[in-house]
Amino acid sequence: MCGIVGYIGNNAVDEILLSGLKSLEYRGYDSAGIALNDNQGIDVFRAKGKLQNLTEVIKAKHISNRQVSQGIGHIRWATHGEASIENAHPHLSNDGKLVLVHNGIIENYKELKDELIKQGYHFFSQTDTETIVHLIDREYKRVSSLEQAVIRAISMLKGAFALCIMHHDEADKIIAVRKNAPLIIGVGKNENFIASDIPALIGKTQAIIHLEDNELAIVKKDSVVVKSFDGKILNKPVETVNIAQDAISKQGYKHFMIKEINEQPQIVRKMISTHMSSPQQSIRFENIDIEELIENIDKIEIIACGTSLHAAQVAQYMIEDLCNINVTVEAASEYICKKHLTNNKTLSIGISQSGETADTITAIKQAKEKGAKILILTNRPDSSIVRYAKYVLPLNAGIEVSVAATKSYTAQLTALCLLSLAMAEKQKNTNPEQLLPIKQELLMLPTKIEEVIYSSTTIKKCAEKYNGYKNFFYLARGINIATAQEGALKLKEISYINANSYAAGELKHGPIALLDNNMPILALLPQHSKTFEKMLSNCEEARARHAHLIAMTNSEINKKELFDDTINVPEISEFLSPLLFSVPLQLFAYYFADSLNLDIDQPRNLAKSVTVE
C-alpha cells in the first residue's frame, strides 16, 4: 500500500525521489518523507499530508551545497500508528547512521521491540517499521557489514516487507529486500532506481529487474547484484518495459478518473477484437486452453476484493446462466479465514487489478494447496499473484492512476463475459446459435459506451442536483445487484456519502425504514430484465415513503409522477447490461464529487493497491 522509491547516481537525488513519489500517489498515503545520504551523514525530511508539504520542508532545510549521491523515499498509508510526522518514514537508527523505508506489516514486531528496548534501544514512533531499523542496526554493530546485517535481521521477521536500506558508513549502496510485498529495480547508465511499482520509473528507465519473494538486491550506481536470502547470487533477467510518459499524465482532463472513464470504449473494443475475430468464430485466449481449463471441473469459485468482487458477482450470474456450473463468490479477506471445500475439481479464479492484493494472493495460495486449478485476471501480468497460476488472462487496461477503479472494472467485466461465452462454447450440450446474439451485441458495446460518455450532460446535471444529500440508496435486481453495489461504492469512495445498495426485493425487509424525503434512490431498470415490473413496484413502494427516485434505464418509462429524474442508457440486453450501466454510474459519482470540489483521484483513507492483509 505504501510507496517506496530509491535512487543512487549522479543526478539530483531529491528531485528524482519526489518525482517517483508523485507517480506513486495513486497508491494512497497520509504522510511522506525522504532520506539523503552522503559522506557527511544522513538527512531525513518528513511531512504529514500531501507531497507539497514535504517539498516545502526540503526547501526549508536542505543543504544545497552537499553532493548527495543516494537516497530513499516513501509515502505512507498508516497501519501501525496514526498519520503523523513521528510515524512517517524514513526511520533512523538511534545513532543516525542507518535509515530505511518499509512497505508491509511485521507480525512479531511487539516481541522484537520489547527485546530491543531491554537492550537499550529508544523508539520514537508507534510503527512496526522502527523495529526493523534497530534490529538491523544491532546486527550491523555485530558484523560490520550492511548486507550481512540485513540478512541476519530479516531472518527474525515474520510478515510481509519490502525494504530500502542505507547506511552512512557504506554510502556506495542501497539494499533492497522483498518478501510478500512488491519491489522492482530500474537499471540505468551509471545510475539505478528502486520502486514499488513501474509508474515511479516511467521517463527514467525502461530496463526493469523484478525482485521475487525472498530476494535481496545490492544496488550501486554502476551495478545490481541480486541474491536469495541464503546468499546465493541469482542471474535475474533485465526486462524492457515500454510505457509512454502520457500513461501517467492527465492529457488535459481535470482528473485521472474522468480520463480513465473516457478510455473505456477503446479498451473494451481492443479486448473484444483480440479474443473474438467474429461472432461466428469461437472465442480464443492466448495461452489458455478452455477445454483443459474446465475439464473435470464441477465447481468454480471466484475470489476478489472491493471493485473486483463486484465483477466476480456479475460473472457468477453469467457463468451459471450460460454454463450450468455451480459458482461461488468469496471476498478474499473472508476466504482466508474460513474452511472451504476447494479441491482438485475446483476452478479458482482470482481477480486483482494490481495483482498485488495481499488477501487475494493468500486466498489463491490456499486454493492451489487444495489442488484447485488457478486462473488469474489481472491488469498487471508481471505482478506477484501471477506466479501462483497456470492460466492468466491479462486485462490490458493500462495503468490506472485514480484510486477509484473504472476502466479496470469494465475490462474485468468484459474479460469475464468473454470467458463465460468461451466456456459455454466448449460444452457439448451448447448450441452455438444460442450464443450468437450475445456475441453480436457484444461487438456493439464499445459504441454504446461512447454514446453514454458523449451524452453525459444529463448525468452531470442530475449529480449536481443531489449533491447536498448525505445518504443514498442504489436498488437493482438479478445480475445488476452487483452493478448497484459498485455504483454505491464509487459514490462512497470519492464523495464520502453514505451510499448503500440493496437487492430491491429486500427493501421491505428492513431498509425501507430509512426512507423519507431525505433519501434519494437510484434504481437500475434494464428494460429487458425479467424483473422489470417488480423493480417498478419496488420503486412505487419507495415513492410512497416520499423518497426521491432516479431511474437509470434503457426503457421509455412514462411515469413522471414516479421518477424525479431519468438517466437514459442505450438499448442493451439484461445479460450485457452490467457492462454498460456501470459507466453512467461512474460518471454520476464523478460529477457528484467534482461538484463538491473533492480530491477525486486520491480520496481520503484509501489506497489503490492493498498490499497488506
Image (cartoon, helix red, strand yellow):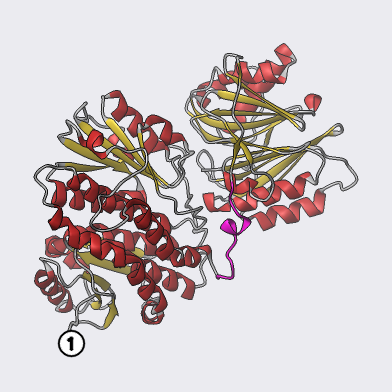
Q: Position of residue 63 (x, y in %)?
A: 86, 46
Q: Position of residue 207 (x, y in %)?
A: 64, 39
Q: Does residue 104 appear anywhere in the picture? A: yes
Could you tell me which secondary element the residue under label 1 belongs to? Answer: loop
Q: Where is residue 47 in the image (x, y as percent from the top left)?
A: 67, 50
Which residue lies under the disc numbered 1?
Answer: 561
State which quadrant residue 249 falls in: bottom right
Query: Is residue 432 located in the magenta-colored stretch of the structure?
Result: no
Q: Which amino acid does label 1 sit on?
A: Glu
Q: In this view, does 23 lie above or below 188?
A: below
State which quadrant residue 580 falls in: bottom left
For mark 1, does the 10 Å Cα neighbourhood hold few (<14), some (14 to 19), or many (20 or more) residues? few
State which quadrant residue 450 falls in: bottom left
Q: In this view, does 354 lie above or below 480?
A: above
> Which residue is at a point 12% across and 45% down the rendered structure image?
324
User: Chief secondary structure of the magenta span?
Assistant: loop
> Which residue is at a point 27% across and 73% down the rendered structure image?
519
> Which residue is at a point 11% across and 51% down the rendered structure image?
431
Q: Position of residue 457 (x, y in %)?
A: 41, 81
Q: Is residue 225 above or below residue 209?
A: above
| Residue 319 as seen in the image, left or right of residue 88 | left
Query: Is residue 247 located in the magenta-colored stretch of the structure?
Result: yes
Q: In this view, does 357 lie above or below 337?
A: below
> Which residue is at a point 17% across and 36% down the rendered structure image?
299
Residue closer to the observer: 145 or 517 = 145
The residue furthest right is: 65
| Residue 406 as seen in the image, left or right of residue 146 | left
| Residue 127 as seen in the image, left or right of residue 340 | right
Range drawn in magenta? 242-253
